[in-house]
Amino acid sequence: MRFRVPQRFRRSAIGLDYGATTFRAAQLQRRGPLWIASRLVQSEHSPSESTPTNEEGAKEDSFFERLQLAGFHGRKVALALNMPDVEYVSLELPEVMLAQDPTQTKNAIRFEMERLISNHKGAVEIRHWRLPATNVPAPNALGAAASSSSITKMLDTTRRLGLTCTAVDSAALAQSRFAHVLRPPQPGRVRGVLDLGHVQSRLIVCIDNIPVLVRAVGAGGLILTQRISQSLKLSEKASEVLKREHGITVLGQRQRVAPEGSVLPLEMLNPVAHASTPVLSRVESSPTTQLGSTLFAAVRTDLSELASEIKRSYEYVLSCYPDRQAGDLLLVGGGAGLPHLYEFLGNALGIPVLRAEDCLQHSECRLRCVTTKNDPLDGYATVIGLALEE
C-alpha cells in the first residue's frame, strides 16, 4: 500500500492528516528501539474547511506556519487517506493468482476490486496486502481502493505549501503501526483499533500487526453530540461541552479507579473478567453521575449499536482464525477521550479496552512523548503512525 522515499536522517518525515475538524502533524526521532515524538501539533477548524480549494487554502497556509513555529524540521511529509476516501475489500483469491508474476497479480486484483467497490466512481488507485495464513476458508488478501482525484487534491495542497510528499498511506495501516509501537500484540490474540472520528467510527482488526478487517462500525462524535442536543433541547455547542466534560455514566457499572498519574496493567482493565479486582468500584449516584447517566440515555442506542458491530467484527475474524482468541481494543481518534466510554465498551464486549494514554508507561511501549489532558495522545494515532519507519 505504501511507497517510501528512503530516509537518511534521524528525524522522520512529518506525518500530516487533514482531518474533518482538525489538522494534525507529528514528527519523530529514532533512538535505538524507541521512537521519540519530538513534535506534535494540531489545529481545529470547521468541517466545511477540511477540503482545500483555491478559496479555502488560508487554513492550510496558517497550519503550515504553525508547523514552522513549532519547530518541525524539513519539508518531507507523509499523508493519510481516511474512510470514505479509501474503501477496503476482503478478497478470497486463488493462491496461484497471488503467486504469479507481480504485474499479472496486480492486474487481476484490480479487475476484482473494480467489480466489488461501491463508493468510488472514475479512476481509482488500488493496492493490496496478503493476510496471515489460516486453516479454514477465509479471505487471503485485503484490497484498498482510493479515488485518484482525492489523492491528486492532497498532493496539490502539499505542493502549494512547498512540501514534498514521500508517501500516501491509509489511516488503517498507520494506526495499526501506532498500536504496535505502543504495545506489541499478545501472541495468539486478535487486536482491534477503534478510530472514533467526527462523522463515523472505524474499526481495524489486526492479526500479528496486519489489518485483516477494516470497516465503519457506527456513529462518530458529531452524531452523539446531535443526539444529546435533540434529547436535552440544547445547542450543539453546549451539548459538545457537556459531552466532553461529563461523558457517559451507566449507574451500577463498575468503573476504573486508580491513583492520579498511575497506569493500570492490562489484565486489570477488563471489567467483566476481573470484576472483583480492588481497582474497580461501582459508580455511586451523585449530581455529576446523574448528568452522565442522562447523557448516556441520549446516546444509548448509538453506543449499543457500536458495541454490537465491534463484537460481530471480532467474531467474524475469530471464525477465520479459529486458533486465536480475542485480545484488547485500543481507542484512538478525537472521540477516544469521551469520559467512561472505555468502561462501557469493556463491559459490553468482555475484553480489555484501553486508551493510548494507558499504554505509555508500559514496559513494552516503544513510544515516548509528552501530552496534556487538553491535547491527549489519542488524536495523534494516525500522524504518529505515518511518521513511523519500521
Image (cartoon, rainbow, N blue to C red):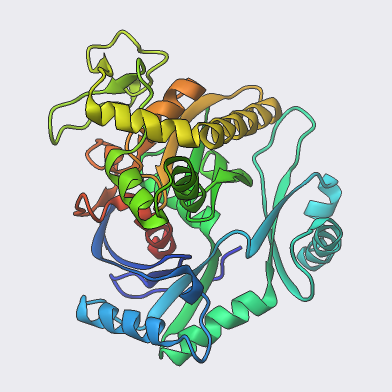
- Please tell me whether residue 177 is drawn above or below residue 258 in the rendered image: below
Place of residue 229 in the rendered image (x, y in percent of width and height, measured from the top left): 44, 48
- Between 283 and 313, which is closer to the camera in this rendering? 283
Q: How many marks?
A: 0
Can residue 43 be seen in the rendering of this structure?
yes
- Examine the image and state in which quarter residue 295 appears: top left
Give the residue displayed 74% in from the left and 28% down from the top. 135
Residue 342 horizontal side relative to residue 219, left or right: left
- Please tell me whether residue 233 is drawn above or below residue 112 in the rendered image: above
- Examine the image and state in which quarter residue 26 appears: bottom left
Residue 95 horizontal side relative to residue 71, left or right: right
Which residue of the protein is positioned furthest toward the left in this rendering?
A: 260
Q: Quadrant of the N terminus?
A: bottom right
- Between 229 and 152, which is closer to the camera in this rendering? 229
Q: Quadrant of the C terminus?
A: bottom left
Place of residue 263 in the rendered image (x, y in percent of width and height, measured from the top left): 21, 32
Place of residue 130 in the rendered image (x, y in percent of width and height, measured from the top left): 68, 49
- Examine the image and state in which quarter residue 168 appears: bottom right
Residue 361 horizontal side relative to residue 208, left or right: left
Place of residue 235 in the rendered image (x, y in percent of width and height, measured from the top left): 40, 54
Give the residue displayed 36% in from the left and 55% down from the top. 379
Which residue of the protein is positioned furthest toward the front in this rendering?
A: 233
Give the residue displayed 43% in from the left and 58% down from the top. 382
Can residue 4 be seen in the rendering of this structure?
no
Give the residue displayed 74% in from the left and 72% down from the top. 124
